[in-house]
Image (cartoon, grey):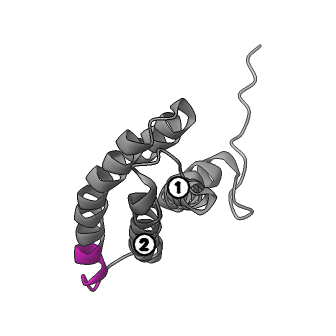
Amino acid sequence: MALVLLVTVTDAAGASTLSFYLLLAAVPSIVVAGLAALEELVQPAALPHRRAVGMLHVVTLLLVLVSAALRAPLRAEGSVPQAAVSAVIACLVVFAVQALIGATPAIRRLLARATPRPDQQPAPEIVSR
């Protein structure tokens, strides 16, 4: 994710060749993360939110590959097609969705602790005199 975020910074700085190489460097990282997620998917006790995160790795990989493919022919000119920038932004959005989905169980646990269940009686108050 950091490499893809760095691509947006280098695009803004006008370093299109560096952006291209950063995208190429991001591909193996996304593939390794996707393979780790795939390993969890084939486990019989895989949690539903982990399945969604694993499926989204495919989307991020495709977006990074599309962005790199769109940039490749124009690298010598130093220009970046708008579609390539849009693909990088979409990839960042998918990363954010993955993070949100991954944090969902923790958020549910926090909310469950914060709200009392209706079947629970409130703790009696201790009155001291």
Disc 1, SS: helix
Q: Residue at x 45, y 69 (%)?
A: 66
> Could you tell me residue 14's position as x and y percent?
51, 34
| Labelled pair 2, 1 in contact (Cβ < 8 Å) | no
Can see residue 4?
yes
The first of marks 2 and 1 along the sequence is 2
> Could you tell me residue 70's position as x and y percent?
47, 65
User: Residue tagged by mark 1?
Assistant: 88
The foreground one among 128 and 59 is 59
In the image, what residue type sits under mark 1? Val
Q: Name the quadrant containing residue 121.
A: bottom right
Most distant residue in the front direction: 77
Most distant residue in the top direction: 129
26 in magenta: no
- Which mark identifies residue 62? 2
115 in relation to 42, above or below: above
In the image, what residue type sits under mark 2? Leu
> Could you tell me residue 13's position as x and y percent?
52, 30
Can see residue 1?
no
Part of the protein shown in magenta: 38-45
The foreground one among 72 and 87 is 72
Q: Residue at x 39, y 49 (%)?
A: 76
40 in magenta: yes
Q: Name the quadrant containing residue 33.
A: bottom left
Q: Residue at x 26, y 56 (%)?
A: 29
> Could you tell me residue 120's position as x and y percent?
68, 58
70 in relation to 42, above or below: above
Q: CA gap, disc 2 to disc 1?
A: 10 Å
